Image: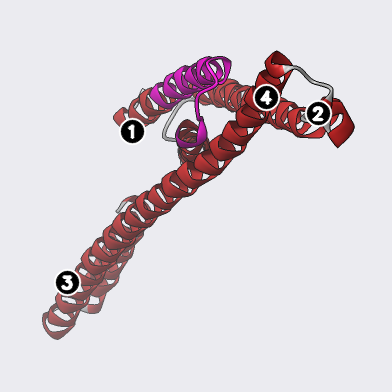
Amino acid sequence: MSDTYRGDIERIQRLIQQLRSDIQKREQKINANQPVGMIDGEIRGGISKLDREIELLKSLIERQSQNQEILQKEGETRKNKLLELQNVAAELKQSFDKSLKSQQDQLFNNRSNGGKQYKDTEALQQMDNKQLHQNQKQLQKEQDQKLDVCIDQLDTLKVQGKNIGNTLDEQNRLLNQIDKDMDKTTKDMMNVNGKLKKFLNSSSYCCLYLFIALEVVSLVLIILFV
């Protein structure tokens, strides 16, 4: 098992473990009537990152199989592991979506039913002090729920902005790495051309053909493995 493959697997497993923990914390917050906007943003960001990591792992396995860097049996084992991780990621997303829908349905029911019991003035006039107090508490609870929704949305926007920034940083890092690889490849090609020019000025045609063949093989290896 290569270091790259092992590192990718460990990173994905840590993400899965963190997402499971965050989803569990979210349920606890909902049961305690606490805002969940912040943790919702973290879960969305974690799911997006998990999808990216799984796609990178998929590309790695496909490249290793095509280049015959691993045995066929090992390739099948890694593909099965990839499928297992994809299924776990799908289950986590489904669990999160189900929790979101359940929360939205509950909020909708609260808004639809809130205040209907005492909505007309005549009914309010017939209430005693205890009933009026209970009605006031109900209205205050509905207002608090609406404020919680606003807070959740603001927290979600804040975390999404942070996730966007992290994604941009990661893409910039990848672009910088590509630039470095391109510079290295360009320098290698310039070295090959320089050697070829020197050889043309001092070698026979037989040696020239042999040298050209060796340089072509070297260039192909550089392109494939750098």
Graded by Cα atoms within 10 Å as few (under 14), some (14 to 19) or many (20 or more), the crowding at tag 3 reads few
Mark whose residue sits in front, 4 or 3: 4
- Name the residue carrying label 1: 4
Vertical comparison of 222 with 194: above or below: above
Which region is colored magenta?
Answer: 13-38
Q: Earlier in the sequence, mark 1 or mark 4?
A: 1
| Distance of label 3 from label 2 (alpha carbons) | 91 Å
Vertical comparison of 72 with 157: above or below: above
User: Mark 3: which amino acid?
Assistant: Asn
Mark whose residue sits in front, 1 or 2: 2
Q: Earlier in the sequence, mark 3 or mark 1?
A: 1
- Left or right, 225 with respect to 112, comes to left
Image quadrant of residue 106? top right
| Distance of label 4 from label 3 (alpha carbons) | 80 Å
User: Mark 1: which amino acid?
Assistant: Thr
Indicate which disc residue 124 carries. 2
Tell me the quadrant of the picture where the N terminus can be found. top left
Graded by Cα atoms within 10 Å as few (under 14), some (14 to 19) or many (20 or more), the crowding at tag 4 reads some
- Left or right, 138 with respect to 211, comes to right
| Distance of label 3 from label 1 (alpha carbons) | 30 Å
User: Mark 2: which amino acid?
Assistant: Leu
Vertical comparison of 195 with 220: above or below: below
Q: Earlier in the sequence, mark 3 or mark 2?
A: 2
Q: Earlier in the sequence, mark 2 or mark 4?
A: 2
Graded by Cα atoms within 10 Å as few (under 14), some (14 to 19) or many (20 or more), the crowding at tag 2 reads some
- Name the residue carrying label 4: 138
Would you say residue 220 is visible in this rendering?
yes
Tell me the residue at 85%/35% (across/down).
121
Report if the CB atoms under discs 1 and 2 are less than 8 Å apart: no
